Image (cartoon, rainbow, N blue to C red):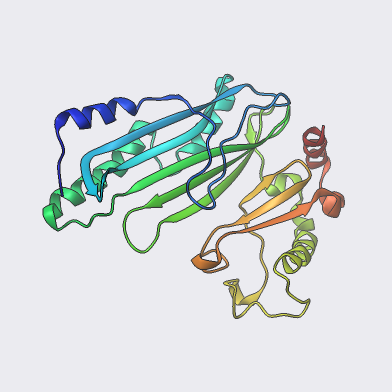
Amino acid sequence: MIRYAFLISMVCLFYSCQQPAKQKEAEEENEPKQAAVQKSDTAKYSMMEFKRISPYFQQNEEQLDTTYFEVFYPKFENPVVDSFVQKNLLVDGESTLDEASDSFLSGYNEFVEDNDDRISKATWFKKINLKIHVNSPKVISISNFTYEFTGGAHGNYYSLWTNYDPINNEKIELKSIIPDYKRKELVKIAEKHFRMLEKLSDTASYSDQYFFDNHQFALTENFGLLKDSIIFYYNPYEIKSYADGPTELKIPYDSIKDLFNAKGLNYIKSIAN
C-alpha cells in the first residue's frame, strides 16, 4: 500500500465539496443518467454532488486510485419536499451525508491499517444516484440507485423506489391507491405482463430460473409511478441470480385503471397532465 504526499491528499479532499452536479453519462452498467430539471417539473430543485475520498492511495499501473463515497441527488427549494428526499437518500440509518460517508470510508481505512502491505490493489467505492421520474403537482416519484464495491468478484447494486404526495405530505403506499381486496386481481394482471416480459408460456414453471416462494408469482413492494405505467422493480437476488440482473416490470395504467380507487386515479391524472 503506497501512501502519497500530504499535498496530494489535501488537493483531492478539497475537491470533495458539495456543488451542483453536471450532466454526465453513468459509468457503471445499470446506473441511470442524471435527471435534468424539466420545464414541466412542478417542485423546483437543483442536482447536487457530494463526494468524499479516503486519504489512502493506490498506484494502479500509471494511475492513482483511492476509495470514494459519491452522491448525486436533487435539492428541492421546498423544505418539506426536500426533507422527504433526504429520508430516501439516507436509507442505512445515518442522519447526514457526512455521517454516511464517514461510516463507509472508515471501514476501508481500518481495513488498510489492519492489513498494511498485504492489502490488495482494489479500492472501494459507493455511488448513490437519486433520479426523479415524476414531478407533478400531486406526485413525486424517485428512485435511489446505489452501487457499492468493497472487494470480491463484483460490486452490488440496487434501486429503491419511493412515491410522495407533496400536497398531503405523505408517502404513497400501494394499498392506498389499489385497495387490498383488489390485490389478487392486480397480481393476476401483473403475472400476465411478467410472463410476456420474460417470454414465458402461460404454463411454464418458475422453479428453475426464479426465486419465488413456493414457485408462485409475487409482486414486490418496490414500485414507482411513471407517466403512463406503474413499475415494479425487482433487485438482483430478489427473484433471479445476480448474473440475470434486475427486473423492471411495467404495467400500463390502462391495463389496471379499474383497480385504482379515487385517490389513485387522481394521482394518475395528475401525472398524465
Q: Is residue 41 left or right of residue 144?
A: right
Q: Give the x, y percent position of residue 271.
A: 77, 35
Residue 72 left/right relative to 198: left
In which quadrant will I find the C terminus?
top right
Question: Horizontally, is 159 left or right of 11 in the view?
Answer: right
What's the residue at 25%, 50% (across, down)? 60
Residue 106 visible in this rendered orientation of the protein? yes
Give the quadrant of residue 139. top right
Please tell me in which quadrant of the rendered image residue 218 appears. bottom right
> Where residue 249 sits in the image (x, y, percent)?
69, 57
Q: Farthest residue to the front: give it.
A: 62
Residue drawn at 25 percent across, 47 percent down: 108
Closest to the observer, 82 or 93: 82
Q: How many marks?
A: 0
Residue 188: x, y in percent?
A: 78, 65
- Image quarter for residue 81? top right
Can residue 96 be seen in this snapshot? no
- Residue 213, above or below 84: below
Identify which residue is drawn at 70% across, 24% down: 42
91 or 254: which is nearer to us?
A: 254
